[in-house]
Image (tube, grey):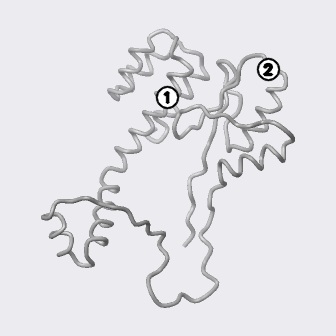
Amino acid sequence: MAMISMQRIFTAFQGQHRLVSGPAGEVALVVKRVAARPDEPIIIFEDATGRSIDFDLRGGDREVLARLAKLIPPPVEEATPPTEPRGRGRPKLGVVAREVTLLPRHWEWLNAQPGGASVALRKLVDEARRASGDRDRERQARDAAYHFMSTMAGNLAQFEEASRALFADDRRRFTGLIADWPADIRDHIVKLAYSDRA
């Protein structure tokens, strides 16, 4: 079965205008060309977090892309099927051993579950992830929008009120408060905050 991972998207702003949005390499090369003749400062943001990030743009295009590949590995498009038949024993699941501290009654319950404590804990975590997945995505989107907004719009009119509306999840009030902000900034904030809930 093919596994497709999310590709990390970055957006560069030059002053109040969106310059480019896309994968790291694409954004870096556009910024490199524009930065050679800057009119206004350029800031690159990672869309998933809303935080600014610096790319090392020294040297030629190949050098820039090689450094980015180390910093931001490309997404894994497909899981390659094993070329050899699987041997005996446990499959390689990428299991990481870590310490977990629980009360004796928790250990008793976990150990009484089919498959033991490890299987029970994995099932509990998977169930919790499914149950809170939407809330987690909404929180991450809101946080990304706020981080971007703080950097690019912290000095704009009604920033504090807009922040309160964002965290209260009052979309109508929020979009009304930022309606007069520069279009590219406003549109990017709305995209970060609400694109998965369109």
In three-dimensional space, the C-alpha distance between marks 2 and 1, rounded to whole angstroms, equals: 24 Å
Residue bearing the label numbered 2: 38
Q: Residue furthest right?
A: 60
Residue 161 coordinates in the image, percent (x, y): 38, 15
Number of other residues with Cα within 10 Å of mark 2, as a class: few under 14, some 14 to 19, many 20 or more: few
Residue 184 percent across, percent down from the top left: 61, 23
The residue shown at (65%, 53%) is 73
Farthest residue toward the left? 105
**Residue 147 marker:** 1
Contact between marks 2 and 1 (CB within 8 A): the answer is: no
**Is residue 8 depicted above or below 31 in this figure?**
below
Q: Position of residue 40 (x, y in %)?
A: 73, 17
Q: Residue at x 32, y 26 (%)?
A: 168
Above or below for 169 versus 119:
above
Question: At x 62% / y 73%, what residue is drawn?
Answer: 80
Q: Would you say 144 lies left or right of 166 here? A: right
Please tell me which of labels 2 and 1 falls first in the chain: 2
Along the line of sight, the residue nearer the viewer: 139 or 108: 108
